[in-house]
Image (tube, grey):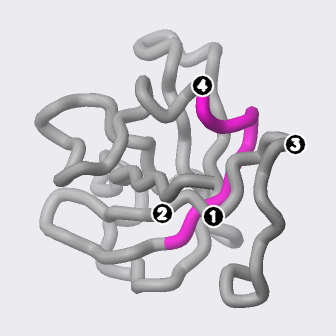
Amino acid sequence: MDEMYFTIAGCRHYFGSDFMKKGMKVKLVKEPDNEYDKEAIQVKVKGLGKVGYVANSPFTVKGESMSAGRLYDKIGDKAKGKVVFVVDGGVVCRITATGKETDAIVTENEE
């Protein structure tokens, strides 16, 4: 699996991003019934629930990370990621499992 990165946006509407640290695991869940964005992907953290969404605007996508629109067809209904770094206005993460059957086997370092 090629490395894919995404930005979590909208954290300030939930719990903020101050608690997020490098290596933290996140879960991505597609939200096709979202009334504002049919390619919405919510981001969850175990024990907290929804902490934001995969950024889908040129104003919120950081660096070379993928927007929700670019990522949507590359993942299953649920996927997994890991925080790479926390920046002002967003959290950049790497996909560790796409949730598709074609996923490469996850290495011990990623579990």
Residue at 55%, 18% in the rendered image = 34
- Which residue is label 2 attached to? 94
What kind of residue is marked 3? Glu
| Mark 1–mark 2 distance (CA, rounded to whole Å) | 6 Å
In the rendering, which numbered label is found on residue 73? 4
State if disc 2 and disc 1 touch (CB < 8 Å).
yes
Left/right of residue 105 with respect to residue 89 in the rendered view = right
Element assignment for label 1: strand
In the rendering, which numbered label is found on residue 96? 1
| Mark 1–mark 4 distance (CA, rounded to whole Å) | 16 Å
Residue 36 in the image: above or below residue 69:
above
- Which residue is label 3 attached to? 101
61 or 21: nearer the viewer? 61
State if disc 4 and disc 2 touch (CB < 8 Å).
no
Residue 21 in the image: above or below residue 57:
below
Residue at 41%, 84% in the rendered image = 21
Residue density around tag 1, few if under 14, some if 14–19, many if 20 or more, within 10 Å: many
What kind of residue is marked 1? Thr
Q: The magenta stretch spans which residues?
A: 74-82
Q: Quadrant of the N terminus?
A: bottom right
Residue 53 picture quarter: top left
